[in-house]
Amino acid sequence: MTDPLYAGSFEHDGVSYAKSIFWGNGVYGPNTWQMHKMPIKASYCDAFYTACMDDYFCGEGDFWACSADYKADLAAATAEEEEAALAAAKAKLPDWALVLIIALAVIALLITGFVTFIVRKEKQGSPVFTQFDAKADRSPAATA
């Protein structure tokens, strides 16, 4: 008895084929994806099972349900990224605040350099700031 699905014929590239040749022994039948009498090592099957035994499949087990789940997850992830980018943009300092911070850092660096210069001169014995009279007495014209 022939399945009505395989009754009749069909045409492909101008050649007519009987549908009945695609029914039967696993080579042309509805299970053409199966590897009939294909030798596979038991160690390979065991390794494959061990590698995949904790895996889960999405959807109801078919490609289209899995694709729908993937698209929904991708849309959710994109929405989360956009929200994070928006929050980061709101938390950004205004440009004038950034310029002010840089200017204050430069001023602090200059003050630190100036204080370091003064302390170094004091330790060398030639202070930058002395009494005006004492400096006038040390001039070469006053000693001559």
Image: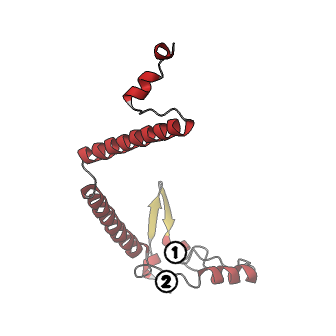
Q: What SS does tag 2 mark?
A: loop
User: What residue appears at the point 56 percent right and 84 percent down from the top-left corner?
Assistant: 54
User: What residue appears at the point 65 percent right and 83 percent down from the top-left corner?
Assistant: 50
Point out residue 135 in the picture as x, y percentages from the top left corner.
Answer: 43, 26
Which one is in front, 132 or 46?
A: 132
Q: Work out whether residue 37 can be spotted.
A: no
Which one is in front, 41 or 46?
A: 46
Q: Quadrant of residue 45?
A: bottom right
Q: Which mark is drawn over residue 2?
A: 2
Mark 2 surroundings within 10 Å by alpha-carbon count, few (fewer than 14), some (14 through 19), many (20 or more): few
State which tag comes first along the sequence, 2 or 1: 2
Q: Quadrant of residue 33?
A: bottom right
Point out residue 92 in the picture as x, y percentages from the top left corner.
Answer: 28, 54
Q: Quadrant of residue 131?
A: top left
Q: Work out whether residue 21 can be spotted.
A: yes
Point out residue 143 in the picture as x, y percentages from the top left corner.
Answer: 50, 16
Judge whether 91 appears above or below 143 on screen: below
Q: Which residue is mark 1?
A: 20
User: What residue appears at the point 37 percent right and 40 percent down from the top-left corner?
Assistant: 106
Which one is in front, 72 or 98?
A: 98
In the displayed structure, does residue 44 sit left or right of residue 115? Answer: right
Judge whether 113 appears above or below 93 on screen: above
Query: As shown in the figure, which amino acid type bears the numbered disc 2?
Result: Thr
The alpha-carbon separation of the residues under discs 2 and 1 comes to 8 Å
Callout 2 touching callout 1 (CB < 8 Å): yes
